[in-house]
Amino acid sequence: MCFFLISIIYFCYNHKRLTLIENNFILAIESSCDDTAAAVLNNREVLSNCIYNQNTIHTPYGGIVPELASRAHQSKITPIVNQALHEANIDKKDLNAIAYTQGPGLLGSLLVGSSFAKSMSLALKIPIIPIHHMHGHLLAHFIENNNYESPKFPFIGITVSGGHTQILYVKDYFDMGIIGNTLDDAIGEAFDKCGKQIGLSYPAGQQIDELAKTGDSKKFSFPISNLKGYNVSYSGVKTAFLNFIKNQEKKSPNFISENLNDICASLQYTLIKIILIKIEKIVADLNVSQIVIGGGVSANSELRKQLKNLSSLKKWNLFLPPVEYTTDNAAMIGIAAYYKLMKKRFGELTEICKPRLII
Ligand SMILES: Nc1ncnc2c1ncn2[C@@H]1O[C@H](COP(=O)(O)OP(=O)(O)OP(=O)(O)O)[C@@H](O)[C@H]1O
Ligand SMILES: [Mg+2]
């Protein structure tokens, strides 16, 4: 009798887990760095995608302060999740799974999102799905979009973001290998750190993009690293840029303000060129024509323009994400979770966050 009762309880608990419903509602939570984000997806369709951006908290410090980031996640996660459910017009009882970013990222930030997701999964008795943040950046291309066809496997994935600059050979949704990586700074980090040197606030990437639009990219030149193979390096250009600015300011104290647009255009040209050289090389070497870009720096208008020009010249099939899915968002975590849900690849409540989770 006792065994019979336990079996019924176990069956009820796992009912949603075992029955893969065709119409799945997924709540996704992203809290790897300084954006508290939640989204609701109905299969591949995004019903809501809400973000609380912490820039105003970190800007006075010129970069992310991990302790402040975790505190802000703690205070914003409940309102953001409620907002995502409200905008999607979904009751939490209708959810079929909860996804969260397991890593890589800041431990204190990851812990807030994962603990919240685990508690909800336990309370609602639905599966939990841990997601690799960088899978999310690439799989954002599979979000349902009538104006947009998703890439076909295999493809070359390029992630250009605040913490990563990677070139990947992507065989399937979760089967990908790194073939090129930054040996030091990420491209977004280079945008932000160089921007700081010329008085721009954190994060500087988007401001440099705007200022560069009316600047001359040939006015100043900085070293364009070109390592052997497919790895890249951004520390050289960063140091050269810092020294250049210091020297110029010694000669002319108003150098930055008098040349801001040209400085930004020249810097942006260099940072973009470093990755473009590698993309051209890899396409030629591997003879793969599908190029899929992801991450915050893929919002950069000049990078997008250059990639489009190269693609039409070289007949590549280029996939640039819609701008709302470039920087951190929870919709990209939700779409990655959808493909795990389809394969019943669920997580466990005992799984821990991994700040250095590898692909
Ligand atoms: N228009 C733009 N031009 C250049 N850089 C940009 C632009 N918009 C955003 N960025 C840069 O994108 C980065 C943020 O991207 P994202 O949110 O993907 O990074 P992250 O999550 O901090 O890092 P990661 O994804 O590697 O963990 C910042 O470095 C920011 O300056
Ligand atoms: Mg990111």
Image (tube, rainbow, N blue to C red):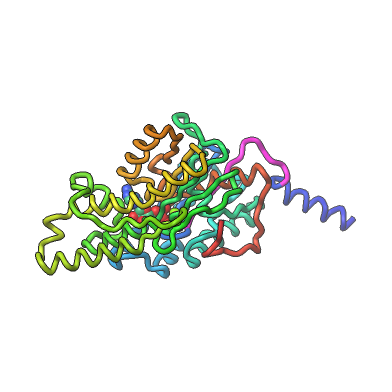
Q: Residue at x 51, y 62 (%)?
A: 110
- On whether residue 103 falls in the magenta region, the answer is no
The quarter of the picture where residue 187 lies is bottom left
Q: Residue at x 46, y 63 (%)?
A: 74
Residue toward you, 18 or 277: 277
Q: Residue at x 41, y 39 (%)?
A: 322
- Tell me if residue 142 comes above or below residue 80 in the rendering: above
The quarter of the picture where residue 267 lies is bottom left
Quadrant into which the N terminus falls: bottom right
Q: Which residues are magenta?
A: 18-31
**In this picture, residue 204 sits left or right of residue 140:** left
- Count of numbered tags: 0
- Tell me if residue 253 comes above or below residue 342 in the rendering: below
Quadrant into which the C terminus falls: bottom right
The percent coordinates of residue 93 (x first, y second) are 60, 46
Residue toward you, 6 or 240: 240
